[in-house]
Image: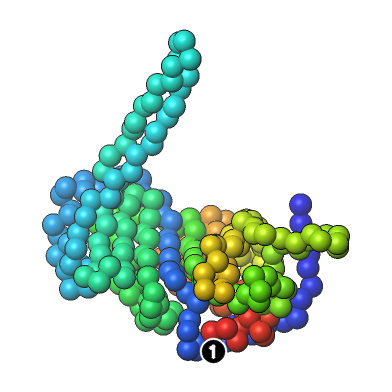
């Protein structure tokens, strides 16, 4: 199903907010690695290469739990997994990097340094990933922003449409209102071939404010591209970065954007 919705064109220009809404940003490069390296063999050398910015090295374990019904109604649980990758953190815990057989994941916890600084660091980290994991191609690149929107309450209620342009609307029935929501929507941006998954949810009210989570992740799939090498990664990141800014600004009204100025 494809549904189109017309809206005013929004600017993708970065705006400096006095109180930025972003809580966390995640950059991800999904790669194809035919022969994952021996983690015990590369751990010391990789830790040495990352020591300046990410001095804390940890094993990254991944487990899968399978529940199977058994005789007499007694279920059995099987646990599979173990060491999956390597995780590195800075001393403040505000930056985390995961090196795994499926790709490179970089997390920035607030305050987010900004795209220009982060993409420069991402390029360096990708060079190290390529050095130790030898990927043969890239499948997808993505950027995920987790934003917190502090919507003010008046006598315990709010007209959400005054602040947010997306989300749930209640039918026009006397006495009916929305007490909360948690919804996931998928969008696609043509012709850029950008997919986006958005989770919009209300959180627990606090101090006359209704926090709203705006969690949006934009993807570009490189599977169908002629160039699936690292040369295609950075223009794709530029595209998802620009689109993420445009989507954020389009998701809020001027009154909503004013909450961060």
Q: Position of residue 157 (x, y in %)?
A: 67, 70
Element type where label 1 sits in the image: loop
Q: Is residue 151 left or right of residue 129?
A: right
Residue 86, percent from left and from top: 26, 54
Which of these two is toward me, 217 or 215? 215
Task: Give the image location of residue 234, x and y in percent.
Answer: 45, 72
Residue 114, given in percent of the width and then of the height, sits at 42, 81
83, above or below 211, in the image: above
User: How is this picture coloured?
Assistant: rainbow
Q: As drawn, which residue projects farthest toward the front?
A: 155
Q: Residue at x 79, y 59 (%)?
A: 176
Q: Residue at x 19, y 59 (%)?
A: 57
Residue 164 vertical position relative to residue 174 in the rendered view, above or below: below
Left or right of 241: which side holds 182?
right
Question: Is residue 174 shown to the viewer in this render?
Answer: yes
> Where 109 falls versus 115 (above or below)?
above
Q: Nearer the viewer, residue 197 or 169?
A: 169
Residue that mark 1 sits on: 261
Q: Residue at x 41, y 55 (%)?
A: 31
Residue situated furthest top in the rendering:
72
Instruction: Tell which of 49 and 163 is nearer to you.
Output: 163
- The foreground one among 237 and 154 is 154
């Amino acid at each position: 199903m494809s549904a189109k919705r017309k809206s005013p064109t929004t600017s993708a220009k970065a705006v400096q907010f006095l109180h930025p809404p972003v809580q966390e940003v995640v950059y991800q490069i999904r790669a194809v690695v035919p022969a994952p390296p021996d983690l015990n063999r590369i751990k010391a050398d990789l830790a040495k290469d990352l020591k300046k910015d990410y001095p804390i090295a940890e094993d990254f374990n991944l487990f899968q739990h399978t529940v199977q019904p058994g005789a007499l109604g007694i279920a059995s649980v099987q646990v599979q997994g173990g060491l999956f990758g390597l995780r590195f953190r800075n001393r403040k815990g505000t930056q985390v990097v995961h090196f795994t057989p499926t790709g490179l994941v970089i997390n920035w916890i607030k305050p987010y340094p900004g795209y220009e600084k982060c993409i420069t660091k991402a390029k360096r980290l990708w060079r190290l990933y390529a050095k130790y994991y030898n990927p043969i191609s890239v499948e997808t690149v993505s950027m995920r922003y987790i934003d917190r929107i502090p919507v003010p309450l008046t006598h315990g209620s709010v007209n959400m449409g005054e602040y947010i342009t997306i989300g749930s609307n209640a039918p026009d029935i006397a006495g009916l209102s929305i007490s909360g929501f948690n919804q996931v929507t998928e969008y696609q941006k043509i012709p850029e071939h950008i997919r986006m998954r958005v989770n919009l949810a209300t959180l627990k009210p606090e101090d006359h404010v209704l926090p709203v989570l705006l969690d949006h992740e934009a993807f570009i799939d490189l599977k169908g591209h002629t160039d699936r090498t690292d040369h295609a990664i950075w223009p794709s990141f530029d595209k998802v970065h620009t689109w993420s800014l445009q989507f954020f600004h389009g998701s809020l009204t001027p009154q909503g954007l004013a909450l961060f100025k």
